[in-house]
Amino acid sequence: MKKVIVLLVVLAISVNAFADIASSKHNFTTGQITGGEICAPCHHPHAGADISEANAPLWSHTLTSAALAPYVSITSTATAAMDLNPTGTTKLCLSCHDGSLTLGMFKGSAGAGSAMVAGLVNTATSHPISFDYAAVALVDGDINDAGDNSGFGSTITLDLLDGDGKVQCTSCHDPHNNDNGSLLIYDNAASALCTACHAK
Ligand code: HEC
Ligand code: HEC
Ligand code: HEC
Ligand code: HEC
């Protein structure tokens, strides 16, 4: 009996360890528009893929052209370092999450007229994104240096910033992995994700 319980616990843990894209809200195969494919709305493996955006891997979904309304606060220094429009992976995310394009607007899809994505993100009232982290860390003493240990295995630069050293949606989210819930990139228990960058 004990062995069975141990086995069940091990199974439960390992099932949880595979909370990949298929068990996340980014599994779009439950809708009718993707032709049963998970990756197709975001990636296009052949000619015709959009590689115009920095750090955009073989992109399939139509890119948003909506302007970024940045978050502004009296204490934040990030706004000055921010790109005028969303860049990199943030632009990829907003192509579905800013409410300007439908889920089905991707290469080879017949479902362009499908519904808008639920779960819209308003950049004006969200964590600042699309800015140079090191430039802000230089002037904000409460922000850890980019070369500091993130607590997630390597430096802040390697673990949390994009290829250009910028904070993007992907600083906090992994679009493929739901191990940590809410598609978070690392476990945010005790706010470890927040304190990786914020010296609080
Ligand atoms: C909701 C959109 C979305 C879906 C669905 C998606 N991806 Fe991605 N993928 C992204 C974004 C955004 C990036 C770039 C940011 C990053 O690397 O996390 C990326 C990066 C990648 C990369 C390069 C970086 C890396 O993580 O290795 C590969 C390979 C990849 N995706 C494969 C896949 C495959 C295979 C599937 C289907 C099982 C898939 N993706 C589904 C959005 C998506
Ligand atoms: C990749 C690094 C990074 C991560 C992870 C991160 N932040 Fe930030 N955050 C920053 C930087 C850099 C700023 C801009 C600081 C500035 O403007 O001086 C910022 C700004 C903020 C602000 C706005 C401060 C102001 O002056 O208005 C708040 C609040 C905040 N973060 C909270 C959080 C929370 C909560 C988490 C965890 C869920 C988090 N952050 C995760 C880097 C990060
Ligand atoms: C192809 C369209 C598409 C793209 C591109 C996309 N998403 Fe999503 N995302 C969705 C849809 C649809 C949902 C489900 C919304 C709902 O039903 O609440 C979702 C849900 C989410 C959720 C909520 C997960 C949860 O468990 O509550 C997060 C977080 C998220 N997306 C982050 C991102 C990030 C970060 C990116 C870019 C790296 C991204 N998404 C790119 C379509 C997309
Ligand atoms: C500083 C970290 C951080 C950044 C940057 C960030 N998110 Fe999130 N996001 C979170 C956390 C933490 C949650 C978990 C839900 C909560 O309690 O707010 C979340 C939740 C979400 C959700 C679920 C719905 C909701 O509002 O709770 C979506 C969709 C989402 N994020 C998309 C995005 C997109 C798109 C971007 C880039 C424009 C982005 N996030 C940038 C930390 C972040």
Image (cartoon, rainbow, N blue to C red):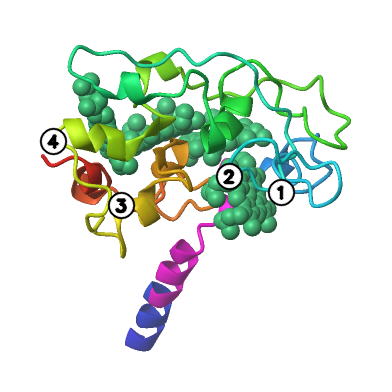
Check mark 3 vs ligand 2: CB closer than 8 Å? yes or no: yes
Q: Which mark is residue 142?
A: 4
Which residues lie in the magenta part? 10-27
* Percent of width and height locating residue 4: 41, 83
* Percent of width and height locating residue 64: 65, 22
Residue type, label 3: Ile
Question: Does residue 45 appear anywhere in the picture?
Answer: yes
As for residue 16 lying within the magenta part, the answer is yes
As for residue 199 lying within the magenta part, the answer is no
Numbered disc in front, either 1 or 2: 2
Numbered disc in front, either 3 or 1: 3
* Percent of width and height locating residue 34: 79, 40
Q: Quadrant of residue 182?
A: top left
Circles 1 and 4: CB distance less than 8 Å?
no
Check mark 1 vs ligand 1: CB closer than 8 Å? yes or no: yes
Check mark 4 vs ligand 2: CB closer than 8 Å? yes or no: yes
Crowd rating for badge 4 (residues with CA inside 10 Å; few <14, some 14–19, many 20+): few
Q: CA distance from mark 4 to mark 2?
A: 28 Å
Left/right placement of residue 46 relative to residue 182 reads right
Circles 4 and 3: CB distance less than 8 Å?
no
Residue type, label 2: Asn
Q: Which mark is residue 55?
A: 2
